[in-house]
Image: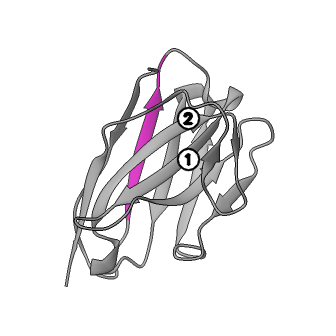
Amino acid sequence: EVPLVESGGGLVQAGGSVRVSCTASGFRVDDHAIGWYRQAPGKAREGIACISGSDGSTYYAESVKGRFAIASDVAKNTVYLQLNRLTPEDTANYYCGAAEDCSASGRIKGSLLGWGQGTLVTVFS
């Protein structure tokens, strides 16, 4: 298991924004694909965004395209997910994973390096 630590969640009013972070140790984020997932209570896990380590290409699920943005800071070995125009339906535990590559739908694929524990984002109206 490769340590990935998420941070930055919290309470956000509907329509607002928040940025969550995924910091890696033991490997470089630009050597692997990093994907953000979320899981709401009682719902299936959903892959929402992925950034390729090889060329920085980004991929998003349709549910978040145009509202969320994934980016990496290689110097900090961290991948961020900016969440904008939030609604209560975005309330979930957000966590990151590392693997070989991204799929076009915003998931990671290939050999899995590991997952983080997640950070909770709660959107209230």
Quote the CA–CA distance across marks 1 and 2: 6 Å
The residue under label 2 is which amino acid type?
A: Ala
Q: Which residue is mark 2?
A: 98
Asked if marks 1 and 2 touch (Cβ < 8 Å), the reply is: yes
Question: In percent of the image, x 36 and y 39: which residue is there?
Answer: 6
Q: Answer few, some or many: residues within 10 Å of disc 1's Cα (few below 14, many 20 plus, some between 14 and 19).
A: many
Q: Where residue 5 sits: x, y (%)?
A: 36, 32
Mark 1 and mark 2 lie on one chain; the one further toward the N terminus is 1
Question: In percent of the image, x 41 and y 23: which residue is there?
Answer: 3
Q: Quadrant of residue 19?
A: bottom left
Q: Which mark is residue 108?
A: none
Up-down relation of residue 2 to residue 32 (above or below): above
Element carrying mark 1? strand
Question: In percent of the image, x 42 and y 79: which residue is there?
Answer: 85
Q: Nearer the viewer, residue 10 or 39?
A: 39
Up-down relation of residue 34 to residue 41 (above or below): above
Q: Residue furthest right?
A: 55
The residue under label 1 is which amino acid type?
A: Gly
Q: Where residue 30 sits: x, y (%)?
A: 68, 30
Q: What secondary structure prevails in the magenta region?
A: strand
Q: Which mark is residue 35?
A: 1
Q: Answer few, some or many: residues within 10 Å of disc 2's Cα (few below 14, many 20 plus, some between 14 and 19).
A: many
The answer to whether residue 29 is magenta is no
Query: As drawn, is 25 to the left or to the right of 12?
Result: right
Q: Where residue 114 sits: x, y (%)?
A: 47, 29
Q: Quadrant of residue 123?
A: bottom left
Q: Quadrant of residue 73?
A: top right
